[in-house]
Image (cartoon, rainbow, N blue to C red):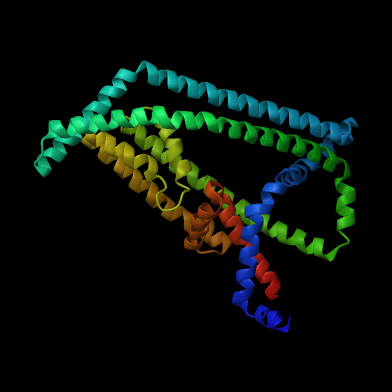
Amino acid sequence: MSFLLGLWKHNFIKLTVITAGVLLFFRYAVSFLAPFLIAFLFVLIFLPFLKKINAKTKIPVGILAGVLLGMLAALLLLAGWFGICRCMDMVGDFRQNGDYFKDCCVDVLHTCCDFVGEKMQVDAGRLERRVMESAENLVVSVTDHVAPKALDASYSYAGTVFDAVFAIVVTVIAIILLVKDYDRIKTALGKSKGFVKMRELSRKILTLLKIYVKAQAIIVLCVSAVSMAGLLVCGVQRWYLWGFLTGFLDMLPFIGSGIVLLPIAIFLFLQGNVWQGIGCLLVYGICVFLRQILEPKLIGNKLNVYPIVVLLSVFFGMQFFSIGGIILGPISLFLIREIYEEIKE
């Protein structure tokens, strides 16, 4: 025991243990506690509003919470229905213009094969036929192997849907129960020093998280606006969709907006639209420059964290938590720093 206490005196050991504990908590514990954490956040945000309505109408807060949940569910269903309809419209447009897209792909393939054949001194026609044969073999392989596996995986998808529905039901019940007893639970826990420390730490983390999310939202909106305007000027179809995706994916580390803009530029070059392709590359450069300008001001200065550290937290967060690491990575960073400073004090 004395050996362990001696190790605990070293700051590196403290930081390592805190980091491991935070990452393991978010990796394994949060998935089990998610319905109750969501319920707590819902009550924390909406309970003051529900109390005001209760004071005027004398309707129990439990019933008000149920009505509010019903309205939110209706909005989500409408948003989902609208998204599904838009996707179906896009699929319909793709099917109607299938011949056009096929001709475009053939033209791009022909241009690429001619370019490669000229530079490498090979028969361009033979190369094009080999590529077409490979594409046909790939389609046959997908039909014969991937489709049956996808059908087999549908059973696991059904289990996932059932788990999601069960989690939603538990969350709704937890919200209604927590709304009724929130004040009494808060009073009882307020007598514990550990709870008071945890509440102060949670407030710090929420403040830092608000700053981070607000900063990312501003950067995403600015990048989306610039990319939409640039793609519109370049004459790209569905510029609004590609522009929004550019702004959203700009949060990803290292590649960011290039995931969308670089393939569009390459496609325009292959079609022979040189100036439009150059315009897309110019838009990409502006988006990168815009993030480099806004990120230090909105994130580094206000959070007292170097932007490169935030970028590393997003990168390692995505390695550890998948796509959720965009948010969980910085949250883990803030939590590790605050717990470490608290233990040092």
Q: Is residue 175 above or below residue 326?
A: above
Q: Which residue, as the protein is rendered here, is positioned at the far left?
A: 121
Foreground of the two, 297 or 272:
272
Q: Which percent across, then down, holds residue 259? A: 38, 43
Residue depicted at 53% across the width and 49% down the height: 322
Residue depicted at 89% across the width and 61% down the height: 191
Q: Which percent across, then down, holds residue 163? A: 68, 36
Residue 276 seen in render: no
Q: Is residue 190 above or below residue 146?
A: below
Q: How many marks?
A: 0
Q: Is residue 56 above or below residue 315?
A: above
Residue depicted at 87% across the width and 33% down the height: 56
Left or right for 277, reference 203: left
Left or right for 247, reference 56: left
Residue 195 seen in render: yes
Q: Which quadrant is the N terminus positioned in?
A: bottom right
Q: Which percent across, then down, holds residue 195? A: 81, 61
Left or right for 339, reference 58: left
Q: Which percent across, then down, holds residue 273? A: 23, 32
Foreground of the two, 92 or 273:
92
Q: Which quadrant is the C terminus positioned in?
A: bottom right
Q: Is residue 74 above or below residue 288?
A: above
